Amino acid sequence: MIRVAAVGDVHVDSDVLGRFRPALEELPHRADVLLVAGDLTRHGTVEEARCFATEFGGLGVPVVTVLGNHDHQSDQQSRIIDLLTASDITVLEGDATVLELHGKRLGIAGVKGFGGGFAGACASNFGEREMKDFVNTTEVIAERLQDALLSVEADALVALTHYAPVPDTLLGEPLEIYAFLGCYQLGRAIDAAPTTLALHGHAHHGSERGRTPGGVPVRNVAHPVIKQAYNVYQLLSEEVDLKLVAT
Amino acid sequence: MSTRLDEYLEAEIRNLLTEGRIAELGITVHRREHQLVLGGEVESPARRDEICRQITERYPDVAIACDIAIIRAQAPNEVEEIS
């Protein structure tokens, strides 16, 4: 059994320091790893990333993240990744990591993702150069996720993105902005691998649960959606234990 | 001349909240009679207060009702089994 804690869109700045920490201090009793689905910061500055590392670092469990669109706002994503990596926080950018937990291998493949839309209402690689660049970005990022997922041999495999891979978890958002919240190409990448669970954020007004067309469970863990410090998902269950015991 | 409560004002306020210092993309703005109602959730009371302050500063003659909540950050008490 492996327990995965997850949250996204925490948008940490100095005003948030200390808000998550009490719940995060309990993590070693509740989960084996924490996954953060992007938008770690407000404006993507190194100072905000330092606040994130202070709040979410040194937890006693591995912390694995992807970046979100907010983390790109100041064009300092490389420095943010360096800072987080130096704080023992793993940042996935189209690659994967494997954690040995309780004798099992948990694979995590992650990428930020991008917009583009979903079947019947998606952007096409056609027309103006700007539109082709937009869709090409979507497709390249999705291919990187698929390659990362297929590169891993694990007992359980989690896909971690910021943008949504399915429209199910966008229910509650205005239909007009679905194309800016995710894309079907991420879902197709997830379905191309033996993925156990897909986690994403970005859709603050969306819904928590969905599935890819291939049947992979999808969870929107954006903080405004789950309304708690993190959710916990149990994988590879031998016995179902639906109660957590805080110590 | 007083500020008109119309769709353009809604769009301007959304841009103010998104592109400025606040960087909140999830705040809803609705017109209700003679006031603007702000909704959504943010990570701290300071951010909620800053949102109202910036709108009031930019549009001093617009009445605002602030329904913005602070997202809870407590530990969970349940686990979901994925199968």
Image (spheres, helix red, strand yellow):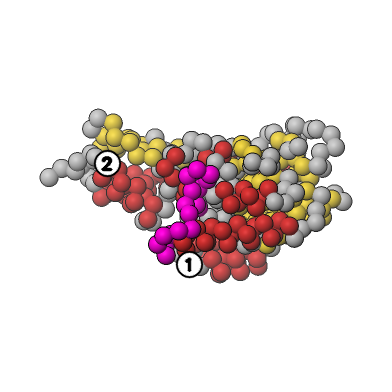
**Residue A92 position in % (x across, y down):** 65, 60
Left or right of A36 on screen, residue A33: right
In-front residue for pair B57/A165:
A165
Residue located 71% across and 40% down the image: A233
Q: Which residue is mark 2?
A: B7
- In the image, residue A7 sits, relative to residue A74, either above or below, namely above
Say whether residue B82 is visible.
yes
In-front residue for pair A195/A66:
A195
**Residue B2 position in % (x across, y down):** 15, 42
Kind of residue at disc 1: Asp
Q: Is residue A227 magenta?
A: no
Give the secondary structure at mark 1.
loop
- Quadrant housing the N terminus of chain A: top right
**Residue A228 position in % (x across, y down):** 59, 39
Q: Which residue is mark 1?
A: A75
In-front residue for pair A171/B37:
A171
- Residue bounds of the magenta highlight: A115-131
